[in-house]
Image (spheres, rainbow, N blue to C red):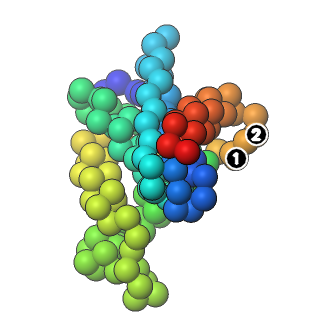
Amino acid sequence: MKTVEIYTDGACSGNPGPGGWGAVLKYGAHEKEISGGAAETTNNRMELTAVIEALRLLKEPCVVELYSDSKYVIDALSLGWAQSWKRKGWIKSDKKPALNADLWETLLTLTQQHELRCHWVKGHADNAYNNRCDALAVEQSTRFK
């Protein structure tokens, strides 16, 4: 399988408010940037959307090295929280409804096609690709102000 690196980030001005997401996909010497946004959303929805849209671009099963500064996304995937929420009818261990179940459902379906390796990176730090994703996300969020 091919190995693809995916960097993602989401941004929101207000929570909820206008938001944006950005992703960079890397395969060998090739890089692709994608981004988008929404007029009324949350930061977590934008974080999830970035991962979803990046995975949707993959045309075959891949080893995916996913890099995100979102503990929400990385922990829910790597620690199995999202799978557990789904098994329990989108209810968390504290008996409260899991937020963003629609996006988690889509994301979990997409991840089944790939070998996903999750990596948390510190936001607004020294990772150039994370910083680029942040810039893409913020740029998109400003379109809705």
Which quadrant is the C terminus positioned in? top right
Which quadrant is the N terminus positioned in? top left
Indicate left or right for 107 with 99 as reference.
left
The answer to whether 37 is drawn above or below residue 73 in the figure is above
The answer to whether 114 is drawn above or below residue 105 in the figure is above
Q: Which residue is mark 1?
A: 122
Q: Secondary structure at mark 1?
A: loop
- Amino acid type for the residue under numbered disc 1: Lys
- Mark 2: give few (<14), some (14-19) or many (20+) Cα within 10 Å: few
Q: Which residue is mark 2?
A: 125
Q: Is residue 10 visible?
A: no
- Mark 1: give few (<14), some (14-19) or many (20+) Cα within 10 Å: some
Residue beneath the point at 44% across and 42% down: 37
Give yes or no for contact between labels 1 and 2 (Cβ–Cβ under 8 Å).
yes
Front in this rendered view, residue 5 or 99: 99
The answer to whether 114 is drawn above or below residue 82 in the figure is above
The answer to whether 39 is drawn above or below residue 57 in the figure is below
Q: Position of residue 17 (x, y in %)?
A: 53, 57
Front in this rendered view, residue 118 or 95: 95
Q: Position of residue 31 (x, y in %)?
A: 48, 17
Residue farthest along the bottom direction in this orientation? 95
- Amino acid type for the residue under numbered disc 2: Ala
Quadrant of residue 96 within the rendered picture? bottom left
Residue beneath the point at 32% across and 66% down: 101
Q: Is residue 17 visible?
A: yes
Q: CA distance from mark 1 to mark 2?
A: 6 Å
